[in-house]
Image (cartoon, rainbow, N blue to C red):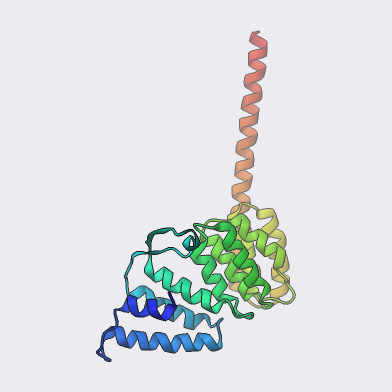
Amino acid sequence: MAFLDLLKQLLQVNESPDSPGSLAARRGLELREILSDDPNDIDAFGELAEIVHSAGSSGEVEDPLTADEGATGSYDRAALALWSLAEELSARPNAWYPLIELARLSVDSDLDGAVRRLTTAVQRDDSGQALAEAIKVLRQAGHPNEAFSLGMGYWDPKGQKFKAGEQLVLAQLDAGRPDLADDHLAMLTHQAKDKHASRLAALREQLERAKDDEEERMREREEQHREAEAGRLATEEEQ
């Protein structure tokens, strides 16, 4: 089902042109036109997503991730409407943000598919904005290793936006890799020059906490090893 049909269904549009549903539907049409011109307009997509979610409707509809298998289940109709919109827009060769949204909607049920969509999105954008959004999607879904692997594969500290490197460092910290985060934070600091001081300071603070935590874990492991070794020696002496 096309996005506009789903939008009307969600908003329960009636004949009254001044009803809340009709007004929201008209705004939805305006935003859809904006996205037709620029599928990467994040603000327009966000506003349209708010309109869809505000409808607050859900029911038994076909899940787009399993539709070719004939599967039917309880699926949020707002999410289905957004999926339909993002899928329509992602066919454009310059459209990267719709792929980010498709990945966000599918990451919990199809991680591999979400990573493929995110990778395609990143390849369509040289600025680093898509990379930052892609890493963020994976981090928020609880997949920091996949997030920093994607980031390390595509981050260009010389030519991309600050937030791409920022998200990469955060993903490495999420994954418990302060060693990698330290290296990339140094590159990010060099890239930023005198900009983004507060954000760099926040990253350094998180990095120092992560290093302290890692040192504490190492001390605990060493203590456990000493205790185990002492127990082994005591057992050998008793024998």
Residue sitting at 32 percent across and 88 percent down?
23
Q: Is residue 55 left or right of residue 164?
A: left
Residue lying at the far bottom in this picture: please name it.
17
Quick check: 119 left or right of 20? right
**Quarter occupied by the C terminus:** top right
Where does the image place residue 184, in percent across and percent down from the top left? 70, 63
Which quarter of the picture shows residue 233? top right
- Depth check: give the residue in front, 68 or 120: 68
Seen from the viewer's position, the closer of residues 81 and 47 is 81
Quadrant location, the N terminus: bottom left
Q: Is residue 25 visible?
A: yes
Residue 53 against residue 32 in the figure, above or below: above
Q: Quadrant of residue 157?
A: bottom right
Seen in the picture, residue 138 relative to 57 is either above or below; the reply is: above
Q: Is residue 105 left or right of residue 11?
A: right
Q: Is residue 92 above or below residue 234?
A: below
Q: Position of residue 99 (x, y in %)?
A: 57, 72
In the rendering, at what x and y percent does residue 40 appear? 56, 81
Q: Residue furthest top?
A: 239
Q: Name the residue at 56% across, 56% down.
A: 143
Please provide percent x and percent y for residue 193.
Answer: 71, 76
Q: Residue at x 52, y 69 (%)?
A: 102
The front one of 9 and 38 is 9
Instruction: Count every numbered label the image shows and give the total.
Output: 0
Query: On the image, which quarter does residue 186 sit in?
Result: bottom right
